[in-house]
Image: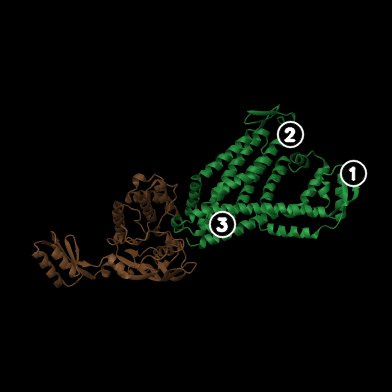
Chain colours: A green, B brown
């Protein structure tokens, strides 16, 4: 146990000695403090602890508008940009050199010739990297958690879902980075290829969505207008009744945002070649880590568990739409449509990806001549 | 338990691409001795140490270290290593490097503190122990490297080019430390291409080149062969005397004449001639084979082969001081 703890301590010291570590900590704290500085009073919203104010009757202290606004800033900017992209990129860069450096000729002589096995060294280094991310994200979320209490008066424990979500996303990408780092012993190559995989995964998601829209569109004959929407709920019920089950392509492309008087087109047999493309792209994508759904899942937990308490009305407040049964039903349909890419599927395939990458990296690390 | 600290049979290493670094090494290293492995750069010396300390995997052959198969993790707790081109974490202080090595070798915390203090004293780094490694000279890094190799109280210590970058005072200290370790009953296995460093301290040597061992044994036994006589004198030889000696194939240096004959009778005419010139004979000594002579004799002045894949480029000199 002592050798393992020694390696962990060394990982921490190693990270602490890097400038990028302090840059990451500094930026993380800065973002958290800026979020903390946003406040609401009787006149409206302020930022930088009152240095800049906006008068707005809909965002006064304790109002639903202020509530929505604060959550929206967190969801879209803090979690959506900072946690999902920037913090993870910084963490990847911070940890990129850990494995290649430990395999350098002189360093390996110090590390790999002692009593811990190479597998123990590998696991200790990996644990050290994850521990680094845990500290970074954990500290950040704690500050945000306190900000919610201070600004909104709620203990929003669901914020802590972002900790495992960010760690899992990081692990997905880092596992690939470790493999490349071990194979090539080049930090730059590892960073570049990891970014490429991340981008590739995002591009595949985008392509699947795009082809999916095309496929859905191909299922309608736009030349033939069958009827006009008079009541949205009726359309949904009709679709469910006709198909026997709720399916993604059941007219929701046109009915979700349909207003009174929107035309409904005749449904025809879709372009099966597009369906084939979707299946192929999904098959390829299944081998990639799926980060967006994991972060989205954390966001959903934030919405449903704490704010909504599972109730529809609160949930609709979060989604920024005025509560009514028609949109709630449509949202249900949308969720069912993406049911195939469920959280379990996304987490499961991502975990398999990480496991395979780390297994290959560990195998190579244990057997490589140094 | 085997009498040998190291007992190797047919150790081979072939790198990808077919480069044969070791071509079936058979070697027995007795316990409690200083063993020198000599050879030019690229001879396979470091590959040998890396195999013994599990940094690289052998392609074939068998062997034991301290009575256990090579690669046994428990045995590695009794092994110390100062690797060639050692790179210690630059963010650690000298003291922390030693403590880090102790932690990896599972040395109890209380013992670590005590040993670290002793070792810092032994390698003369007590005053600089709290400076970071990046502020150290190469010689200071080597001293810390030696200390970290000893922190687990090893029975066998591998030193790969240990005096590389060390100043003369440091080399003298190093030799004293190595002798002291041998006297404590430890086995030292030293890789070097600096023959002069090894000659005063080594008990046994193996001479290696091209992945093969060309000669092995006790140094005294290997170099018992007489190579000639040296007649020393005060004053300067006349040009005629110098010419006569050169005609006879003798080597003349300032104040001495060297004969390649091992027959004492052949020294008499030389002594007579020097006396005839009115010079004072100050000594007549027997010359025996030096380690360098031995090395050259076995290796045949062979230049270093191309370095192994991934091996650092080193200066070609065999005998740099």
Please tell me whether residue B130 is drawn above or below residue A149 in the rendered image.
below
Q: Which residue is mark 1?
A: A230
Q: Secondary structure at mark 3?
A: helix
Q: Nearer the viewer, mark 2 or mark 1?
A: 1
Q: Position of residue A82 (x, y in %)?
A: 63, 42
In percent of width and height, residue B103 lies at: 44, 52
CA–CA distance in space, label 2 to label 1: 31 Å
Residue A107, label in figure:
none
Q: How many angstroms separate mark 2 from mark 3 (CA)?
A: 48 Å
Query: In the figure, residue A154 lies in which quadrant?
Result: top right
Q: Label 3 neighbourhood size at 10 Å, few (<14), some (14-19), many (20+)?
A: many
Chain of residue at mark 3: A
Please tell me if label 2 and label 3 are on a single chain: yes
Disc 2, SS? helix
Numbered mark located on residue A65 in the image: 2
Q: Quadrant of residue B243?
A: bottom left
Instruction: Please name the residue shown 71% across and 42% down the image.
Output: A303
Q: Residue at x 82, y 55 (%)?
A: A218
- Quadrant in which residue A245 is drawn: bottom right
Residue A12 as seen in the image, left or right of residue B224: right
Residue B87 in percent (x, y) is at 43, 53
Q: Earlier in the sequence, mark 2 or mark 3?
A: 2
Mark 2 belongs to chain: A
Mark 2 and mark 1 in contact? Answer it, CB < 8 Å.
Answer: no
Give me the chain letter of mark 1.
Answer: A
Q: Is residue A342 visible?
A: no
Nearer to us: label 3 or label 1 = 3
State yes or no: discs 2 and 3 in contact (Cβ < 8 Å): no
Disc 3 to disc 1, C-alpha distance: 58 Å
Q: Which residue is mark 3?
A: A180
- Neighbour class for label 2 at 10 Å: few (<14), some, many (≥20)? some
């Amino acid at each position: 146990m002592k050798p393992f703890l020694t390696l962990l301590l060394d990982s921490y010291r190693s990270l602490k000695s890097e400038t990028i570590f302090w840059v990451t900590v500094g930026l993380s704290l800065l973002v958290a403090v800026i979020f903390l500085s946003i406040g609401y009073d009787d006149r409206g919203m302020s930022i930088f602890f009152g240095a800049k104010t906006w008068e707005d009757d809909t965002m006064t202290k304790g109002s639903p508008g202020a509530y929505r606004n604060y959550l929206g800033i967190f969801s879209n900017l803090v979690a959506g940009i900072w946690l999902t992209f920037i913090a993870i990129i910084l963490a990847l860069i911070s940890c990129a050199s850990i494995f290649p450096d430990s395999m350098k000729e002189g360093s390996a002589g110090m590390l790999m010739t002692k009593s811990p096995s190479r597998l123990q060294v590998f696991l200790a280094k990996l644990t050290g990297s994850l521990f680094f991310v845990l500290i970074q994200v954990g500290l950040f979320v704690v500050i945000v958690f306190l900000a919610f209490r201070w600004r909104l008066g709620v203990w929003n424990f669901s914020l802590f879902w972002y900790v495992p979500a960010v760690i899992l996303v990081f692990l997905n990408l880092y596992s690939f980075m470790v493999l490349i780092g071990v194979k090539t012993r080049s930090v730059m190559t590892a960073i570049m290829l990891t970014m490429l995989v991340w981008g590739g995964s995002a591009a595949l998601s985008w392509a699947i969505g795009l082809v999916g829209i095309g496929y859905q569109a191909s299922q309608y004959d736009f030349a033939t207008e069958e009827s006009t929407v008079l009541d949205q709920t009726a359309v949904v019920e009709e679709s469910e009744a006709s198909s026997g089950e709720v399916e993604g392509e059941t007219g929701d492309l046109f009915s979700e945002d349909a207003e009174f008087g929107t035309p409904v087109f005749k449904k025809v047999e879709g372009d099966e070649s597009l369906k084939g493309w979707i299946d192929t792209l999904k098959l390829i994508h299944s081998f990639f880590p799926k980060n967006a759904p994991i972060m989205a899942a954390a966001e959903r937990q934030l919405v449903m568990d704490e704010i909504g308490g599972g109730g529809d009305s609160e949930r609709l407040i979060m989604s920024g739409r005025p509560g009514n049964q028609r949109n709630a039903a449509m949202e249900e349909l949308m969720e069912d449509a993406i049911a195939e890419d469920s959280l379990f599927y996304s987490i499961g395939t991502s975990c398999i990806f990480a496991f395979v990458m780390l297994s290959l990296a560990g195998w190579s690390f244990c057997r490589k001549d140094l | 338990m085997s009498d040998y600290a190291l007992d190797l049979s047919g150790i081979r290493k072939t790198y990808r691409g077919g480069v044969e670094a070791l071509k079936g090494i058979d070697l027995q290293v007795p316990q409690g001795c200083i063993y020198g492995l000599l050879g030019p750069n690229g001879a396979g010396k470091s590959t040998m140490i890396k195999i013994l300390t599990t940094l690289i995997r052998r392609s074939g052959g068998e062997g034991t270290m301290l009575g256990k198969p090579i690669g046994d993790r428990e045995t590695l707790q009794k092994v110390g290593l100062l690797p060639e081109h050692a790179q210690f974490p630059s963010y650690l202080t000298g003291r922390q490097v030693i403590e880090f090595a102790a932690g990896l070798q599972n040395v109890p915390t209380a013992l670590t503190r005590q040993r670290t203090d002793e070792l810092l004293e032994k390698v003369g780094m007590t005053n600089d122990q709290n400076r970071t490694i990046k502020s150290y000279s190469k010689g200071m890094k080597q001293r810390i490297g030696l200390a970290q190799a000893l922190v687990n109280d090893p029975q066998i210590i591998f030193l790969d080019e240990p005096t590389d970058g060390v100043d003369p005072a440091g080399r003298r200290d190093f030799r004293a430390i190595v002798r002291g370790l041998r006297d404590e009953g430890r086995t030292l296995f030293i890789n070097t291409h600096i023959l002069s460093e090894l000659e005063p301290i080594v008990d046994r040597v193996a001479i290696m080149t091209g992945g093969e061992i060309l000669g092995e044994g006790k140094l005294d036994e290997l170099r018992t062969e007489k190579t000639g006589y040296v007649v020393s004198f005060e004053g300067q030889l006349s040009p005629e005397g110098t010419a006569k000696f050169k005609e006879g194939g003798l080597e003349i240096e300032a104040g001495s004449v060297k004969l390649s004959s091992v027959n004492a009778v052949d020294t008499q005419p030389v002594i007579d001639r020097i006396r005839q010139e009115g010079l004072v004979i100050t000594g007549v000594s027997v010359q025996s084979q030096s380690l360098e002579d031995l090395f050259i004799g076995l290796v045949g002045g062979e230049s270093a082969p191309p370095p192994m894949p991934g091996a650092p480029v080193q200066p070609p000199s065999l005998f740099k001081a």
